[in-house]
Amino acid sequence: MKERLQKLSLIQQIMYLILFMLIILLSSFIVSNKIAERTVENKVTESSNKIILQIEETMTSFFKDMDGISYSLLYSPTIQSYLSKDEDLSRILMNKEMLSVFSSTLALKENMMGIQLYDREGQMAASAGQAYSPVLKRKVSDIEYSVVNPNQLNGTYYTISVPVYNLQNNRVLEDYRGMCVFIMDVMHFKNILSKSKLSQNSKLLLVDQNDQIITGTDEVSTEELVQVEVLRNDNRYIVQDITLAYNSWKIISIIPKKELLEDLNIIKRLNVVTYIIIFSIFCLFLLIFYSRILKPVKALLDFVKNYARSDGQSRFNVVYHNEIGVLANNLNHMLDDIDTLSQDVQNVQLRMYETEIVNKQMEVSTLRNQINPHFLYNTFELIRAMALFHKVEDIAHISTSLSSMFRYSVKGDNIVMIQDEIIHIQEYANIIEFRFRGKIKIVINVDDNIYKVKILKMLLQPIVENAVFHGLEKKIAPGTVHVSIVRIDENMIRVTIADDGCGIEAGRLQELRVSLQQFETSGNQLNDVSQGIGLANSYRRIKLFYGDQADLTIDSEWKSGTTICITIPADMGIKEMGEANV
């Protein structure tokens, strides 16, 4: 993605940046608008829910009052005595008293329009208030709330039917005396709902258990059925409802969302205008950027691209008097200076390059010629001693190993495979085995997948030789040199040469490390043989051929042993030195 973006032109990058910013602005506008709408809906829903709960509490309080009024009326001595008499004459004599009790009760509630009393046979025994037709259902076992058909009455009313029992009988529920019907005007509920409207076009409806409208805040048909679930699934409205515990009636709140979001529409229009203004500013910025910056830069870029075709003689025509013009003038001056100095610089670089190659070839050749002849002399001495003492075929084996080693050392190739180096070390190990009669052993461990990896020739054997003669030869007890070659990652290998010999004293080890660092500098030679010419030459060679990718470390403990660790690239980073002999 990053590479693809870098390949785009500057104008394309600016266009993508502006498009990205516009998308962010548009997204933020849409998201903020949705959040605002949802916040308003949640607040309105919360307020509407509180209002409905308050209405429920008011109606519940009213129904509780009616319960108290009905119990006080129906279980008064007058009503109980009136219903206990079966003779019409006795009841007629109590009419005046009954009328007084009913009148007192009607005065308790303004919306109580009438009272009808029925006996156990369902016959109307007494009534008070406005004259209404007898109800159809004249016997109930529990309090019932019913809506009166508006065709029967002038207006909308509802009834509260309450059963009457004989209180003097212990088994009250079995001594049914009759039923009392309270005829109630719904205007009381209509007023409660109207005062609780949350907005101008919102509605509050009171419906019965059959979802038939009883009353509402507006003029509604009492015969209309309300489909609450249909309204709830309509996204144009916020619908809430609650069921009254007393009679299973419902209070339904219907609030149009459009009315709630009218103020948000003003903000939305302002945001749209702002968005258009920002877009216009971006377009103006793009126009200025193209004419004042991008176009001059493009002209300057075209000049740079075509400069090579003009043989270095052309110059940029400065027509801009801003920073681009200053840049163009400086470019022309720089081209003049380059024309003046380029030939001299090229000649100097060529001479430096040729000199560096000669120096490197001489230095590598010198290092190769400094291989310690100590091993050669000792080997010939060993051959002579064994020939005089044993007079056996061991001399042939030693001679074969020695011949292989000399043949390998004088081969012309500077780069060999690891398996060639391993064979060379094994030949050397054979000679060491014969010379020290098994006292010194050389153990080799190599990963199977790196035998074909290329490595610098004669890199390992001088270090193994150092370990034998400086570490194990002075040791009385038997000793071992461990040679390990492993791949540490895809591009690097590590060679570890460790012995359990005499080791190096701390002070001497520090001097050796310092000398190795100094030996990296070109021309710095190490003349003290006691400090390890083989190790120093190996360090110098890997730095010459592998550069900074290679590293050599030395760790040692006095009387415990020494470990040399070489890290070099695997077939990578080798600096070929032509056909020079290393």
Image: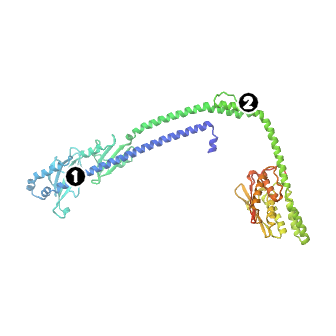
Q: Please determine whether, in this image, residue 212 is positioned above or below residue 479.
A: above
Residue 314 location (% of width, % of height): 73, 30
Q: For the N terminus, which image quadrant?
A: top right
Lateral position of residue 64 relative to residue 274, left or right? left
Which residue, given by chain and number where applicable, does mark 1 sit on?
A: 66
Tell me which numbered mark, 2 or 1, is placed earlier along the sequence. 1
Secondary structure state at the residue bearing disc 1: helix
Residue 281 appears in the figure: yes
Quick one: 191 or 285, which is closer to the camera?
285
Quick one: 245 or 46, which is closer to the camera?
46
The residue carrying pointer 2 sits among few (fewer than 14), some (14 to 19) or many (20 or more) residues within 10 Å by Cα, namely some
For the point 81% across and 41% down, which residue is it? Answer: 350
Quick one: 512 or 127, which is closer to the camera?
512
Lateral position of residue 411 relative to residue 265, left or right? right
Which residue, given by chain and number where applicable, does mark 2 sit on?
A: 314
Secondary structure state at the residue bearing disc 2: loop
